[in-house]
Amino acid sequence: MKKLCLAALSTILVIAMAFNAFAIPFNPNDYTSVNEYSELLPKGVTRNKASERAVRRGDFLVGADLVIINKGNGDIGAYGKGLIEVPVQEAYITIYLDCWDETEASWIQVAYYDAEFYAEDYPDGLVTPTVDIVFKNQPRGHYYRLRGAFAAYDGTTVEGFSPSTAGVFIE
């Protein structure tokens, strides 16, 4: 009798846990890889680098580097590079420039740059898509950071990274 009660209780708990697992719907807006509160660096720091690397073995997009550089006079340099293990068919890099809004205590996107890379344009293989641009004439006296969206497609799978730099003060 004791074994029968224990088995019945175990069955009820398993069923209850199964229903409990589906009780809360998935909301993708609750999950993000964007760092909303990245560090603000001391004034006078003119550059910052963010890197992200794959943690599983066998991934073809193994990393992404993103660098912000104060070029002076309100010009902000942005350098992004994808690191790919084997040649891929397509790669994409989007770099977002964010400005720190002190009144709202949050980052506000002020500019972005998109780049697309295709294997047919790289006879030696598409393995290091790179973007090197300047966001010109940004208002001075503010902190700026970069966020990147890096993606690569090998014909069947898409892999991506989204590093973000710390905030650099632009004088």
Image: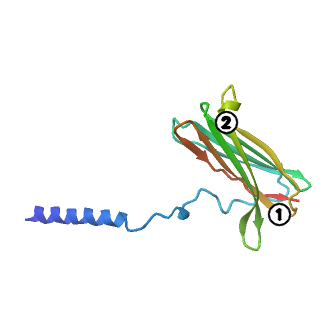
Q: Is residue 21 above or below residue 92?
A: below
**Residue 118 badge:** 2
Residues packed near mark 2 inside 10 Å, few (<14), some (14 to 19) or many (20 plus):
some
Image depth: mark 2 or mark 1 in front:
2
Disc 1 element: strand
The x, y position of residue 65, in whole percent, is 69, 43
Examine the rendered structure and indicate whether residue 94 appears above or below residue 24: above
> In the image, what residue occupies the spot 72% across and 50% down?
95
Task: Please give the label number shown on residue 142.
Answer: 1
Look at 54% across and 64% down and name the residue there. Answer: 30
Rendered location of residue 83, percent (x, y): 65, 37
**Residue 97 x, y percent position in the rendering:** 76, 56
Q: How is the image coloured?
A: rainbow
Give SS at disc 2. Answer: strand
| Tag 1: amino acid | His
Q: Earlier in the sequence, mark 2 or mark 1?
A: 2
- Label 1, residues with CA under 10 Å away: few <14, some 14-19, many ≥20: some
Left or right: where does residue 141 sit relative to residue 123? right
Of 23 and 125, the residue lying toward us: 125
Q: Quadrant of residue 130?
A: top right
Residue 153, placed above or below residue 38 = above
The vertical placement of 164 against 121, above or below, is below
Tell me the amino acid under the disc marked 2: Tyr
Along the horizontal axis of the image, is 59 left or right of 92? left
Count of marks, rendered view? 2
Residue furthest out toward the bottom: 103
Q: Viewer-proximal residue, 153 or 132? A: 153
Q: Which mark is residue 103?
A: none
> Could you say which quadrant of the image residue 145 lies in?
bottom right
Quadrant that contains the C terminus: bottom right
> Given the current orientation, which residue lies at the most extreme top position?
124
- Residue 78 or residue 125, whichever sits in front: 125
